[in-house]
């Protein structure tokens, strides 16, 4: 048997495989892992007044982040990220449900319609809203036409929320769609036959089965919102910065790399926490499924 | 309920196109202010061609996108091929490692790269930009190519080796030609990922290497002009061209196989 195997298949040894993945591993290690370790180290270093660091070990940078000014930004960012994740989840669920229920041959086209705006340049998608919400934009003009006095909706928090939803919605649609599609259609049918209403079928059959996709959607919308820095500046006037703005400001304007590194580590820890929570949620959903 | 879902979904998908249509429409508005419509004009497109700093940024972004896209596609191809065809241990870990840049906020990667480059004494410029963009384009390239390889019929390779082709012969004369569209798709998607990136570029661009998104960002901060709408319209067209070149068939496989591209 083994002789046939070696004759039928070209001989491929393990080391060749490792050689082929080596460049990718090098990129990840040298340009992701090592830099992250350096930032982690910097976040405990003593800053010097010129923008560099003096080395040493201190917890002062993290203590500084407990200052009400920073805490307020972190709290606001978490709230904004959570709100954005929830809105994206609800809207994404509706869109994904609809696409998954469409005729199979039409589904790729509908997905393409969702992804075209997403692949359009991020900045273009963001400043596009100024056309619509800004002074003299369509919305203001329309409101004036019906007699409502309005000036401009940019900058405003509403514009930031809308633009965040716009930026992240497709990211929520895809994982939910993927998990909805893997559900055996006979299950909701059976639930309906057994007398479940639409809501009951959703709550008791589809939602538990779609849990992994939902967890992924939350993860992919919640964490990246923390890193956004363009939207609060362009549509929020920079009045309510997100953590992302704080990191950019600390690095480029305040030239405090140690504090900026500490802030970046906070985002990284939040990201790891949300990945862990999503993982646990998926495991719970999986064990429920196998036990029921 | 079904009707409500359908209507809501159609409204939401329509909502995705409102800003894009607005950008294109305002780019043709003869009036420099958005509250007045003075008829159609192409003046703003002409103005773009006169904007030297903008053209310089465009050149940087194009060069950067081609370099980072090509390198990411090459590295992604090697690792996808290895993961697909070779008995490697820890495939799950490797795949997860490649996916890391998709999950870690880009701003954290940007900050980390900035620190690293200054630690090793590398001055910010085209090289640091390329390195940073490889990081974010690599997951895209790897997953697109891995998806394409998995969709290949394994018997094709067996037939080739039965007919006497060696490993390299099979690769050059069978695998590579079949995968050509997927490679093009991986390159173009890596290119667009690089071309539209702002977070990493903010930290890795040098004085003489302003990218187009950085230029646009600083321009919009001082005020949105019809000229920027014209530029935005051209970038919308670029996206559509990429999608058309990649092809609907290829796109279908990508959509089925992987999560959509980078997060902003």
Image (tube, coloured by chain):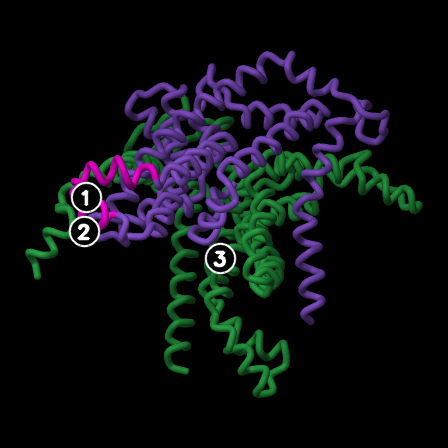
Q: Nearer the viewer, residue A189 or A148?
A: A189
- Left or right: residue B180 compared with residue B228: left
Query: What number is the disc on residue A175?
Result: 3
- Report the residue marked by disc 1: A17
Q: Is residue A57 visible?
A: no
- Report the residue marked by disc 2: B87
Mark toward the viewer: 2 or 3: 2
User: Decide: marks 2, 1 in contact (CB < 8 A)?
Assistant: yes
Residue furthest to the right in view is A147
How packed mark 2 is, by other alpha carbons closer than 10 Å (few <14, some 14-19, many 20 or more), is: some
Residue A222: where, in percent of width, then height? 51, 52
- Which image quarter is the C terminus of chain A in? bottom left
Based on the displayed image, in which of its 4 quarters is residue A245 positioned?
A: top right
Query: What number is the disc on residue B239?
Result: none
Q: Nearer the viewer, residue B110 or A14?
A: A14
Describe the element under mark 2 as helix, strand or loop.
Answer: loop
Q: CA distance from mark 2 to mark 3?
A: 29 Å
Identify the magenta region: B157-177
Q: Colour of chain B?
A: purple
Q: CA distance from mark 1 to mark 3?
A: 30 Å
Is B167 in the magenta?
yes
Letter of the chain shown green in the rendering: A
Chain-order first, disc 1 or disc 3:
1
Is B243 in the magenta?
no
Question: What chain does badge 3 belong to?
Answer: A
Question: What chain does badge 1 belong to?
Answer: A
Please tell me which residue is depicted at 51% across the width and 23% down the height of the picture: B211
């Amino acid at each position: 048997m083994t002789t046939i195997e070696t004759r039928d298949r070209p001989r491929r040894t393990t080391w060749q495989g490792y050689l082929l993945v080596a460049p990718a591993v090098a990129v990840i290690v040298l340009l992701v892992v090592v830099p992250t370790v350096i930032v982690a180290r910097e976040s405990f270093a003593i800053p010097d007044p010129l923008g560099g660091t003096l080395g040493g070990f201190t917890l002062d940078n993290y203590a500084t982040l407990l200052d009400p000014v920073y805490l307020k930004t972190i709290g606001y960012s978490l709230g904004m990220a959570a709100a954005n994740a929830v809105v994206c989840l609800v809207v994404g669920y509706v869109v994904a449900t609809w696409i998954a229920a469409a005729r199979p041959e039409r589904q790729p086209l509908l997905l393409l319609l969702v992804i075209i705006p997403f692949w359009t340049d991020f900045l273009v998608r963001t400043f596009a809203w100024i056309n619509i919400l800004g002074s003299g934009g369509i919305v203001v003009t329309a409101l004036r036409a019906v007699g409502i006095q309005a000036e401009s909706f940019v900058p405003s928090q509403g514009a930031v929320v809308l633009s965040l939803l716009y930026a992240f919605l497709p990211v929520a649609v895809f994982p939910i769609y993927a998990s909805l599609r893997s559900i055996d259609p006979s299950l909701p049918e059976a639930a309906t036959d057994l007398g479940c209403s639409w809501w009951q079928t959703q709550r008791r059959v589809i939602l538990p089965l779609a849990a992994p996709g939902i967890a992924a959607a939350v993860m992919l919308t919640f964490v990246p919102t923390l890193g956004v820095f363009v939207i609060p500046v362009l549509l929020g006037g920079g009045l309510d910065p997100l953590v992302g703005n704080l990191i950019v400001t600390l690095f480029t304007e305040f030239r405090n790399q140690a504090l900026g590194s500490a802030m970046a580590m906070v985002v990284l820890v939040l990201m790891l926490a949300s990945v862990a929570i999503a993982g646990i949620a998926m495991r719970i959903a999986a064990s429920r499924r196998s036990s029921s | 309920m079904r009707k409500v879902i359908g209507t809501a979904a159609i409204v939401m998908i329509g909502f995705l196109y409102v800003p894009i249509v607005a950008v294109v429409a305002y780019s043709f508005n003869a009036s420099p202010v958005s509250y007045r419509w003075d008829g159609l004009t192409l003046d703003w497109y002409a103005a773009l061609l006169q904007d030297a700093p903008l053209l310089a940024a465009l050149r940087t972004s194009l060069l950067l996108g081609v370099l980072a896209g090509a390198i990411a596609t090459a590295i992604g191809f090697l690792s996808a091929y290895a993961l697909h065809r070779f008995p490697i241990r820890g495939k799950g870990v490797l795949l997860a490692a490649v996916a890391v840049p998709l999950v870690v906020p880009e701003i954290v990667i940007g900050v980390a790269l900035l620190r690293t480059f200054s630690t090793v004494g590398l001055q910010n410029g085209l090289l640091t930009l390329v390195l940073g963009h490889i990081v974010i384009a690599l997951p895209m390239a790897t997953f697109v190519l891995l998806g394409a390889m998995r969709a290949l019929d394994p018997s094709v390779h067996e037939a080739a080796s039965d007919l006497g082709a060696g490993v390299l012969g099979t690769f050059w004369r069978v695998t590579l030609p079949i995968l050509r569209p997927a490679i093009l798709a991986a390159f173009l998607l890596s290119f667009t990922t690089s071309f539209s990136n702002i977070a990493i570029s903010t930290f890795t661009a040098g004085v003489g290497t302003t990218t187009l998104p950085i230029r646009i960002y600083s321009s919009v901060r001082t005020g949105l002009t019809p000229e920027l709408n014209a530029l935005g319209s051209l970038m919308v067209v670029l996206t559509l061209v990429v999608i058309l070149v990649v092809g609907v068939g290829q796109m279908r496989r990508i959509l089925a196989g992987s999560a959509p591209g980078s997060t902003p």
